[in-house]
């Protein structure tokens, strides 16, 4: 099943957070559709151990990094290198963006050999 979702056809709820995520368990990539309401903020924080590609789907806002504040609009694609600081501020119409990154390995407890 190559088509996983349609980003134009998502439910109104939740109004904030991950609206969609890849559910297939046997994969090497993760992807999430993130939604922020109008004027919503994700405070600047250090990203995970994976490079992350974002694609702005709807709305607009600002990408905040250590070096600058970059305006975001539908269609924009940005690369956020691993372990770099990033934050988001949604504009008046909110902000929805798709993230794509290598799947992070979960911690597993192994018995003694």
Image (cartoon, helix red, strand yellow):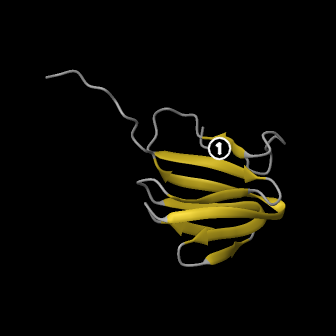
What quarter of the picture does the N terminus occupy?
top right
- Point out residue 10 in the picture as x, y percentages from the top left corner: 79, 44
Q: Identify the residue at image location x=65%, y=44%.
A: 3
Q: Identify the residue at image location x=45%, y=45%.
A: 103
- Point out residue 71 in the picture as x, y percentages from the top left corner: 70, 75
Depth order, front residue of 84/104:
84
Depth order, front residue of 95/28:
95
Can the viewer see residue 5 in this picture? Answer: no
Can the viewer see residue 21 in this picture? Answer: yes
Indicate left or right for 6 with 51 as reference: right
Neighbour class for label 1 at 10 Å: few (<14), some, many (≥20)? few
- What residue did someone put label 1 on? 3
Q: Identify the residue at image location x=62%, y=41%.
A: 21
What quarter of the picture does the C terminus occupy?
top left
* Residue farthest left in this picture: 113
Indicate left or right for 87 with 26 as reference: right
- Kindly state the secondary structure of the residue where label 1 is placed: loop
Depth order, front residue of 64/10:
64
Label tally: 1
- Point out residue 11 in the picture as x, y percentages from the top left corner: 82, 40
Q: Identify the residue at image location x=56%, y=64%.
A: 86
34 relative to 67, above or below: above
Indicate left or right for 23 with 9 as reference: left
Q: Can you tell which quarter of the image residue 104 is in?
A: top left
- Point out residue 44 in the picture as x, y percentages from the top left corner: 59, 62
94 relative to 10, above or below: below
* Residue farthest bottom in this picture: 68
């Amino acid at each position: 099943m190559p088509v996983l979702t349609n980003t134009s056809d998502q439910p109104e709820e939740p109004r904030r957070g991950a609206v969609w995520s890849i559910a297939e368990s046997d994969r090497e990539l993760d992807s999430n559709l993130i939604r922020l309401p109008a004027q919503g903020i994700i405070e600047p924080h250090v990203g995970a151990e994976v490079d992350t590609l974002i694609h702005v789907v709807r709305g607009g806002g600002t990408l905040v990094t250590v070096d600058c504040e970059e305006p975001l609009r539908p269609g924009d694609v940005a690369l956020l290198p691993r372990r770099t600081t990033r934050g988001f501020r949604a504009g008046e119409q909110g902000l929805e963006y798709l993230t794509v990154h290598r799947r992070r390995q979960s911690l597993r407890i192994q018995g003694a050999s």
